Amino acid sequence: MTEDRHVYEPAQGHGLPHDPFNAIVGPRPIGWISTCSADGALNLAPYSFFNAFNYVPPIVGFASIGYKDTVRNIEQTGEFVWNLVNRPLVEPMNQSCAAVPPEVSEFELTGLTPLPSRIVKPPRVGESPVNFECRLTQLIQLQTAAHEAVPTWLVLGEVVAVHIERRLLPDGVFDTAAAGPVLRGGGPADYFSVGPEQLFKLYRPR
């Protein structure tokens, strides 16, 4: 059997117009993270490396390439909120990427509503249909296989409170398609959305 494959070693470069790594590992949920600094300044930023890592207790995490305001705030306070991004929130989510000084609140920049959380201090995005209130469990600077430090920080947090719009819970079961999450793909600008047409069921063997 012959294989027609592009093979490369990342350390030597990929030899392509755009790095395929984050297109292959995707699409991924967007880590839209709200935080506040120790003195109360609000911050909201999206991260494309985000996912769930444990079920009981629920743990989510995201990676920040560079030690940014979000990471500093979480290190200071030990708290953050994840907010689900759907199609109506795509533009404000994208606006919250803007490189602005720490004293500028992305909530004001985007016109979004900061709502009080139940347990943690950082606010929720009021327009988002699902919010996870989180407490920091681990903050880890990544390393290479040779144990050299990488300027990327992995933030893991236990979900201590969940907010879900009731319309997304028909018969008490969360309706992912109705929530319409937007997912990050690869390439410089690729995103995907989830709808009923993508749904199929696959049960585990007994």
Image (spheres, rainbow, N blue to C red):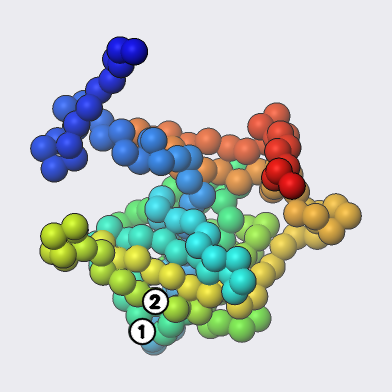
The residue that appears at 70% across and 38% down in the rendered structure is 202
Tell me if I can see residue 199 in this picture.
yes
- Amino acid bearing label 1: Gln
- Residue extending furthest toward the right: 171
Cα separation between marks 2 and 1? 13 Å
Farthest-out residue, bottom: 39
SS for callout 2: strand
Q: Nearer the viewer, residue 113 or 162?
A: 162
Q: Quadrant of the N terminus?
A: top left
* Position of residue 76 measured from the top left corner of the image (x, y, whole percent): 36, 84
Which residue sits at x=49%, y=56%? Answer: 51
Give the crowd class for mark 2: few <14, some 14-19, many >=20 residues within 10 Å: some
In the orientation shown, which residue stands out farthest toward the left?
Answer: 12
Residue occupying the point 50% across, 62% down = 53
Q: Quadrant of residue 46?
A: bottom left
Query: Residue 138, labelled with which disc?
Result: 2
Residue 167: x percent and y percent?
Answer: 81, 54
CB-based contact (under 8 Å), mark 2 and mark 1:
no
Q: In the image, residue 40 lies at what x, y percent?
A: 43, 83
| Whole-percent x, y for residue 63 in the image | 36, 60
In the foreground, 148 or 32: 148
Picture quadrant of residue 117: bottom right
The mark nearer the N terminus, 2 or 1, is 1
Amino acid at the residue labelled 2: Gln
Residue 41 in sight from this viewpoint: no
Q: Secondary structure at mark 1?
A: helix
Q: Residues within 10 Å of mark 1 (few under 14, many from 20)?
A: few
Which residue does the image show at 39% across and 35% down from the upper left?
Answer: 24
Asked whether 35 or 152 is in front, the reply is: 152
- Residue bearing the label numbered 1: 76
Is residue 44 depicted above or below 29 in this figure? below
